[in-house]
Image (cartoon, rainbow, N blue to C red):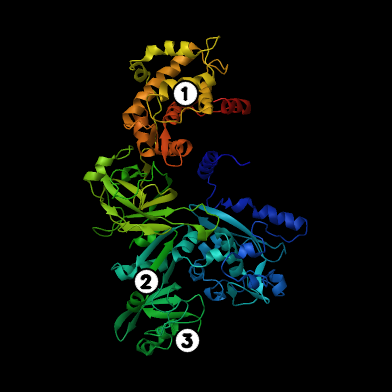
């Protein structure tokens, strides 16, 4: 039995601080360790068979083949297909492979084509510590997935029909790195069918873990060419896509381009044509055939207008899917451009190192999922992060130079990529006075964002590149509508050393006893205690349940549902100083003061006397007691104690407050102001009776 999710979160946070999930120490996908599995296979003279991604129809996935065709699929190892299988044959190139006919994963293969130009990125994804020489049949690949690097182990069994590979097709028969890498990515995403349709940015991010910028070419920035020129000189991946258009998918237009198709940007250059400069972009089609037929295509007469030296250097007349196109035609015929790099250094015209901070957060329904800015009453509840742009040149080349990049990535917890449902997401940035406290609702009613995503996109990631003046800012990531629950990663890149902190991340659980003594009905505890105690002058859980329902629930709310017996048992355990399973008069007196105080607080917020509060009021009600829970703590309270309708009952409200005080005091008493260390027996006793 795995530990509870909250414990897994703690373990994950500790692992992250220790570097687990980094490129140097990636997570083991599905718990598989490549080196130990390979050693086992070698010592036992076995070929690895991956039971977590088995060679059967479940790994193919739904929708790609008819059932009758699935019966024809045979999984074969490379040694069953060729005599001398190799991982690489004469290096790595985009021309090593072409897209198969059964799978619409041009977005993945176009990104992979870009990787072949960047040996550093290729070595990150495809470790060179493996080959077919040991005949163990096991390989591994690394991908960046939602903020962490993961190491994915596969066997080398590949799906075939009639002895031919079904999906990506290697141009050299005995070269298998493209097929194995495609299989590893299919495993990461759930199945091969999960690779059917996608976006360049997704694959590029999974290859690099870097910075992604997407440019809509109908609204291209004036310096787009300069960005592409610098990107080519840095460790960047570039790709683009054509609009869907009117033509049937996968059918070429008269221009030679394929609508709704992804291409790799393989080069940019500037030539002189009849004494005027011409800017060209070189693109590659993952089909390895089908090219642009317009100006500057392979057989365009415009090539006669450049020098012989340039024509010889840049022009290759081959039907290999690669072609040149002018920057003007590129912008007119393509829909968007994606640039993904290890760092945003290419954004600056001069040498400049950008710093970055990363935060993982959650939108929890009713608590921190406030929706976008049009929802004035709830928007402020979204997570808020404060950061500073200090005064100084900040590597700025000229006044107004962009100095900040913000990216927001929404995570998925689905095993299969095609089951992922993206929300429309975006972020809003406001100038503020520096504070670690959350900015209240009133602020957003009177201030406009200085920067924002213009529209909220249904995408895995959104990003924006802009210029900010020196000062303090908060960035508020949000979904389009309130109560859209999810997990996200927010990254802020800056030309200066920027420290971003989550607002409202600190809690204050120090209860003030003065608040309890202010209640006018404190002395009534003796009368109530006398009415319900047993012959030994103690109150057990059953008696406490009856007492609370009759003296607190009845007559105060219209709620039929009262304190459950298990809730009463929890309360007894927390207030039971003598560990007898019952409350004596002193213990009951401590409890009764709190019950009356919490009841009065509740009634201030439950105006209808329904006995239920929406989660949107829970934080205010808790803060009215004098304590301040952090956003993360509020998220856990909501998940643990709210109903499916997003409401809190009066018994749950009281249990929350009692538990907060109890756990906080327990930690302070046992930790002596430092970290808390418990033996196994101590932890067991505390966990069971609390």
The residue sitting at 53% across, 22% down in the picture is: 573
Q: Which is closer to the viewer, label 2 or label 3?
A: 2
> Which disc, if any, is residue 317?
3
Q: Nearer the viewer, residue 367 or 356?
A: 367
Q: Is residue 224 visible?
A: yes
> Relative to residue 212, is residue 568 depicted above or below?
above
Q: Residues within 10 Å of mark 3 (few under 14, many from 20)?
A: few
Which label's residue is closer to the chain start, 2 or 3?
3
- How far is disc 1 from disc 3 in space, using C-alphas? 77 Å
The residue sitting at 53% across, 65% down in the picture is: 195
Q: Residues within 10 Å of mark 2 (few under 14, many from 20)?
A: some
Q: Nearer the viewer, residue 47 or 553?
A: 553
Which label's residue is closer to the chain start, 1 or 3?
3
Which label's residue is closer to the chain start, 1 or 2?
2
> Relative to residue 448, is residue 205 depicted above or below?
below
Could you tell me residue 255's position as x and y percent? 40, 83
Quarter of the rendering containing residue 423: bottom left
Q: Quadrant of the N terminus?
A: top right
Report the side of 517 relative to 40 (left or right): left
Instruction: Identify the secondary structure beneath mark 3.
Output: loop
Quarter of the rendering containing residue 62: bottom right
> Relative to residue 392, is residue 290 depicted above or below?
below
Q: Nearer the viewer, residue 208 or 454?
A: 454
Q: Which residue is mark 1?
A: 665
Q: Quadrant of the C terminus?
A: top right
> Which disc, if any, is residue 255?
none
Callouts 1 and 3 close, C-beta under 8 Å:
no
């Amino acid at each position: 039995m795995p530990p509870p999710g909250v414990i897994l979160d703690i373990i994950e946070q500790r692992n992250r601080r220790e570097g687990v999930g980094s490129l140097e120490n990636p997570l083991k996908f599905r718990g598989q360790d490549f080196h130990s599995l390979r050693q086992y296979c070698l010592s036992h003279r076995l070929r690895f068979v991956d039971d977590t991604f088995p060679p059967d129809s479940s790994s193919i996935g739904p929708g790609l083949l008819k059932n009758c065709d699935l019966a024809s699929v045979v999984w074969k190892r490379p040694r069953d297909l060729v005599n001398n299988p190799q991982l690489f044959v004469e290096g790595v190139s985009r021309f090593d492979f072409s897209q198969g006919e059964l799978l619409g994963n041009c977005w993945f293969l176009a990104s992979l084509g870009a990787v072949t130009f960047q040996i550093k990125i290729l070595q990150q994804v495809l470790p060179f510590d493996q080959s077919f020489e040991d005949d163990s049949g096991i390989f591994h690949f690394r991908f960046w997935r939602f903020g962490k690097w993961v190491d994915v182990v596969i066997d080398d069994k590949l799906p075939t029909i009639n002895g031919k590979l079904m999906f990506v097709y290697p141009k050299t028969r005995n070269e298998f790195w493209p097929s194995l890498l495609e299989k590893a990515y299919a495993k990461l995403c759930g199945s091969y069918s999960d690779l059917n349709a996608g976006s360049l940015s997704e694959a590029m991010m999974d290859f690099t873990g870097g910075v992604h910028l997407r440019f809509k070419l109908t609204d291209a920035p004036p310096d787009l060419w300069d960005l592409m020129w610098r990107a080519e000189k840095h460790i960047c991946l570039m790709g683009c896509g054509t609009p869907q258009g009117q033509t049937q998918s996968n059918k070429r237009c008269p221009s030679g381009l394929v609508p709704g198709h992804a291409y790799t940007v393989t080069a940019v250059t500037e030539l002189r044509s009849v004494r005027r400069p011409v800017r060209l972009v070189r693109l590659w089609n993952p089909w390895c055939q089908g090219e642009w037929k317009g100006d500057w295509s392979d057989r365009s007469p415009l090539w006669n207008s450049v020098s012989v030296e340039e024509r010889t250097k840049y022009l290759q007349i081959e039907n290999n899917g690669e072609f040149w196109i002018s920057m003007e035609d590129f912008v007119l015929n393509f829909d968007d451009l994606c640039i993904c790099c290890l760092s945003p250094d290419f954004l600056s015209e001069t040498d400049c190192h950008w710093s970055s901070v990363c935060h993982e957060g959650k939108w929890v329904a009713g608590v921190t999922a406030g929706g976008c800015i049009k929802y004035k009453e709830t928007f402020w509840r979204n997570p808020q992060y404060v950061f500073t742009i200090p005064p100084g040149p900040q590597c700025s080349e000229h006044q107004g130079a962009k100095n900040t990049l913000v990216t927001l990535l929404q995570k998925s917890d689905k095993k299969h990529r095609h089951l992922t449902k993206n929300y429309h997401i975006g972020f809003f940035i406001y100038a503020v006075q520096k504070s670690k406290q959350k900015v209240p609702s009133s602020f957003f009613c009177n201030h406009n964002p200085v920067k924002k995503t213009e529209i909220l996109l249904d995408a895995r990631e959104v990003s924006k590149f802009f210029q900010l003046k020196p000062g303090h800012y908060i960035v508020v990531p949000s979904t389009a509508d309130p109560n859209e629950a999810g997990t996200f990663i927010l990254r802020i890149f800056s030309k200066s050393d920027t420290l971003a902190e989550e607002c409202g991340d600190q809690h204050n659980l120090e209860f003030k006893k003065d608040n309890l003594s202010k209640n006018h009905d404190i002395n009534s505890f003796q009368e109530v205690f006398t009415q319900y105690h047993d012959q030994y002058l103690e109150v057990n859980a059953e008696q406490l349940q009856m007492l609370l329902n009759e003296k607190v629930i009845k007559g105060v709310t219209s709620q039929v549902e009262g304190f459950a017996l298990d809730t009463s048992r929890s309360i007894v355990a927390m207030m039971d100083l003598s560990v007898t399973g019952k409350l004596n008069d002193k213990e009951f007196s401590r409890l009764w003061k709190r019950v009356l105080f919490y009841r009065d607080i509740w009634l201030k917020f439950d105006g209808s006397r329904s006995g239920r509060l929406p989660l949107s009021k829970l934080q205010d009600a808790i803060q009215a007691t004098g304590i301040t829970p952090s956003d993360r703590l509020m998220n856990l309270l909501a998940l643990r104690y709210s109903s499916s309708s997003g409401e809190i009952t009066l018994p749950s409200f009281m249990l929350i407050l009692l538990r907060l005080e109890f756990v906080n005091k327990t930690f302070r008493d046992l930790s002596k102001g430092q970290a808390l260390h418990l033996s196994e027996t101590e932890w067991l006793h505390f966990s069971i009776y609390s």
